[in-house]
Image (tube, rainbow, N blue to C red):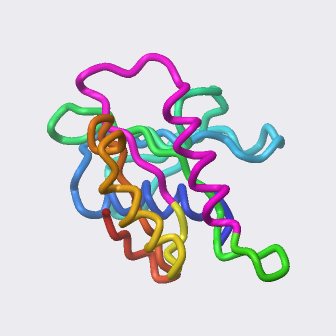
Amino acid sequence: MPEAEVSLRIALHYIQLGKTNEDVGLKKISSEDSWRGTYAVEGYSQRIIIHSYPGKGDVVIRKVDGKFLYVESKKGNLTKGKVSTEYTLMREAIGQLMTSEGYNDDTELAVAVPHSVKSKELAIRWSHLPQMKSIGIRFLLVDENGKVTKI
C-alpha cells in the first residue's frame, strides 16, 4: 500500500467516525502542483486539505476534544529480497515525529503504516517501551479494507 493511500485512509477514518468536526490536513506527497488543494468527502462536511508544509505531519487532524493529532505515514508490505522494510520505515517515522517542532500539550503523535504481521509485531513491542509511553507515540495500522487499528 503506498504512503498516500495510508494517509488518505487515516483521514477518512477520523472523518467517518466523527472524531473530528474540522477539515483534515494531509501533506502533499507528489511533486505535481495539481495535487495541492481542498477535496470534498461525499456525505461529510469535513474536507481533506492536501498541503506541502515540511515538518507538519503527513496527516494533521484537529479532534473533537480540541487536541491535534500529527501522523507520519509510511508505505508498507514491501520486501527487499527476504528482508521486510517495516522496521526501517517505522523507525524513520518515529524519528520524523521526534524532530519536528511546534508540538505542545495539546498534540498527539502517531505512526501510520499498512497492517502486516511484522508492523503489528513491531507496534506492539515498541508501544510498551518506556520512552514511547512517555512521549505518547501511538501506532495506527491500516488494512486493505480501510480498517484502522490503534496500538
Q: Dividing the picture into quarters, in which one does residue 50 lie? A: top right
Q: Which residue lies furthest to the left in this view?
A: 65
Q: In this view, does 146 lie above or below 11?
A: below
Residue occupying image coordinates x 46% and y 82%: 145
The image position of residue 16, as x and y in percent, is 30, 63
**Looking at the rendering, in which quadrant would you find the C terminus?**
bottom left
Quadrant where the N terminus sits is bottom right
Q: Which residue is painted at 56% across and 43% down in the image?
A: 58
Q: Nearer the viewer, residue 73 or 37?
A: 73
Direction from residue 83 to residue 87 in the image, left or right: left
Q: Position of residue 103 (x, y in %)?
A: 38, 21
Which stretch appears magenta? Answer: 85-112
Nearer to us in this view, 69 or 94? 94
In percent of width and height, residue 4 lies at: 64, 57
Residue at image position (54%, 70%) is 114
Question: Where residue 102 sits in the image (x, y, percent)?
Answer: 44, 17
Q: Compare residues 3 and 31 and report the one nearer the observer.
A: 3
Residue drawn where x is 44% and y is 73% of the image: 120
- Magenta stretch: includes residue 37: no
Res 22 quadrant in image? top left
136 up-or-down from 107: above or below: below
Q: Image check: 15 left or right of 82?
A: left
| Magenta run includes residue 87 | yes
Task: Tell me: 142 left or right of 87.
Answer: left
